[in-house]
Image (cartoon, rainbow, N blue to C red):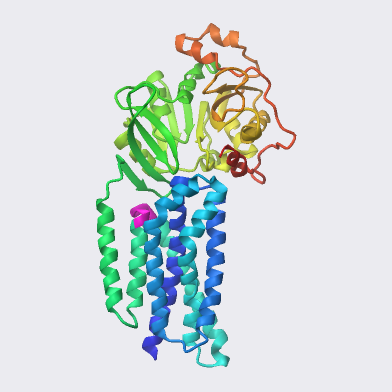
Amino acid sequence: MKNKLGKLEIIIFTGGAVVMVLELIGSRLLAPYLGTSIFVWSALIGIILGAMSLGYYLGGKFSQKNPKLEFLTQILFIASLSIILITILNKPVLNFSMSLGVKAGSIISTLALFTLPSIILGMVSPYAARLKIESVESSGGVVGNLYALSTVGSIFGTFLAGFYLIPTFGSIQILFGLSLILVLMSLLSGKKLLKIILIIVIISLFIANQKTENGYVYETDSTYNHIRVVDRLDPKSKKEVRVLYLATEAHSVIFKNSNDLFSPYHQLYLLDNLFKPEIKKTLTLGAGAYVAPINFLDRYPEAEMTVVEIDPEVTQVAKNYFKLKDNNRLKIIHQGGRIFLNNNQEKFDVIYGDAFASYFSIPFQLTTRQAVEKIYNSLNDNGILVLNIISSIEGEQSKFFQAEYLTLKEFFPQIYVFPAYYYGQNDAKRHQNIVVFASKNPKKLTKTDLLKNANQKQTELINQLWEKEIPIGQDIKILTDNFAPVDHYISKLL
């Protein structure tokens, strides 16, 4: 009897751990297709909880008739199979879900991939509880102890996934590992031949997956991102380019055999000294492949830059696969941008913000009035903020831009707007990169003022200045730490 109790405890703990690892891996699987917005997390948490509730009901139902440990191990075996199914179906399901948009796609993909294993794993605790209960009088204590053990397992799984598994292994590797653990647990009782065959299949699939060519120069999961490096031919220039993908999106693009700036929005950064002629000390929030910092250090041989990039793996990728090199004028801090701003005591001539370059997920804590105030206070007299935003200027898809513009106006007396893809003043509803120059200098600079000091390249870029008034909808409010519906606004872009 003691041996059986020991087996149940192992099963309960393992089941709780597997559920939480599976949920966290779900976010990594969905990220390259649907991002990591609040919609993705809401779908994962809500649907998995709903599926587990159904599993609790079914586990209790099945436990009423002749409960046996053998049946419980069969549940674990089926759960193992259902997780293998995720490794097979994830790409076709996610490719289809991506076409539905982030909201519907998150729901459909989570339903298709995670409902079945969550239901089956939900059956484990109530069935195990019934096996352990010997009398009505002891039932409350037994159920409480088992569910506490399951919760401890979930806590263990959460920390194991977040602090070790995800930064160390690929998502598919982890899924194979979960499947292998469950089938090993199923060996605790019942017939073993089929289970041993499944173990061999899982190991074979794991090895085959390791050898699969994905066409990427590099791919990994870090603590914060799903990272891919891809080489391709740019159809416009007919030149080879290298692209850094974070989750779903291309965050940085460079020419492989040239130092010319590829992205139109990065070219707009070349206007910085027209708004702040003396630039000696700067800050960048969000680095990607460090395209803008590298270009800045080339343009200003005497200037210094501090880069705050949350993900150390992104920095390492920039060093290994892009053109980032050690430079005594470049200081790199791996930290969240808002955390840095909260503690910052330094003053900068220019702050470059490139953390908003996303259709799917934006760190809302950097968009708010409180964050803008800290940015403003971190700038020297007449300092400027150069901010890259993906949005449109007018229409339904411009709400995030409008809200951020309104928030910036709380502090900065002058704001200049440059759409990266400019085809005339009537092209306001196109969603694109919009580079905003927010200046502490109260004097308004006209296009004529800017052209006086511009070189040939800057003269071309100045023509992209948006000179019409920025329309602000009546429903648009200043973003604050308390109210910042950024994910909702940017979902309009999809």
Q: Could you tell me which residue is drawn at 49 percent across and 12 percent down? A: 460
Pick whichever, 383 or 4, lies toward us: 4
* Residue 166 horizontal/vertical position (percent): 39, 55
Q: Quadrant of residue 330?
A: top left
Q: Could you tell me which residue is drawn at 54 percent across and 6 percent down? A: 452
Q: Relative to 404, is 313 above or below?
A: below
Q: Could you tell me which residue is drawn at 55 percent across and 65 percent down? A: 49
Is residue 380 a member of the stretch shown in magenta? no
Tell me if residue 164 can be seen. no
* Residue 90 horizontal/vertical position (percent): 41, 54
* Residue 486 horizontal/vertical position (percent): 61, 42
Overall secondary structure of the magenta stretch? helix
Q: Quadrant of residue 451?
A: top right
* Residue 120 horizontal/vertical position (percent): 46, 71
Q: Could you tell me which residue is drawn at 50 percent across and 44 percent down? A: 99
Pick whichever, 263 or 300, lies toward us: 263
Quarter placement of the C terminus? top right
Residue span colored magenta: 166-172
Pick whichever, 115 or 352, lies toward us: 115
Quarter placement of the N terminus? bottom left
Q: Relative to 101, is 210 above or below?
A: below
Q: Residue furthest top?
A: 452
Q: Quadrant of residue 382?
A: top right
